[in-house]
Amino acid sequence: MQERPVALCHSHELVDGGPAVAFDLVYAGQTCRAFAVRFRGGVHAYLNRCTHVGMELDGQPGRFFDDSGRWLLCHAHGAAYHPDSGACAGGPCRKGLVKIQVSEADGVVRWHTAYNLQPLEF
Ligand code: FES
């Protein structure tokens, strides 16, 4: 199955260290929440599924960064992830977040499908 880009949001909607933009996709056959953030200029997207016990990370919708803007934090039990790789940085996470490839061009951010990541209408 060929990878293809899917429009996610306008570039200006993602502010460095600021609120995330949420989107839905199908991951391994299940509808899942996902999110995109901007960190140090780059856009990064992940499944919104903590690797501790599978909860969504944001207690308040769209709020994933800690107060320092350095870590993505799970509100449930404090797992911390590196914003640019999704790797576990501390707390009870078991492994890194599931990363979704993104690209940004002409003021538009797009996420990229993969064998296990498909748009809802697919
Ligand atoms: S579910 Fe995220 S830290 Fe427990």
Image: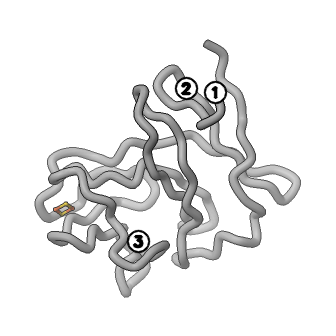
Q: Earlier in the sequence, mark 2 or mark 1?
A: 2
Above or below, 71 relative to 121? below
Q: Quadrant of ligand 1?
A: bottom left
Q: Quadrant of residue 71?
A: bottom left
Dots 3, 1 in contact, CB < 8 A: no
Q: Give the distance between the C-alpha atoms of the residues marked 2 and 1, in whole angstroms.
A: 12 Å
Q: Secondary structure at mark 2?
A: loop
Label 1 secondary element? loop
Earlier sequence position, callout 3 versus callout 1: 3
Disc 1 marks which amino acid? Answer: Phe
Could you tell me the amino acid type at mark 2?
Answer: Ala
Look at mark 1 in the image and give the residue it sits on: 122
Say the numbered circle drawn on residue 114: 2
Task: Name the residue at 70% across, 28% down.
Answer: 4
Q: From the image, tell me which residue sits under label 3.
A: 64
Give how far across and how far down residue 15 sits, in percent: 64, 75
Q: Disc 3 and disc 2: Cα gap in Å? A: 24 Å
Q: Amino acid at mark 3?
A: Phe
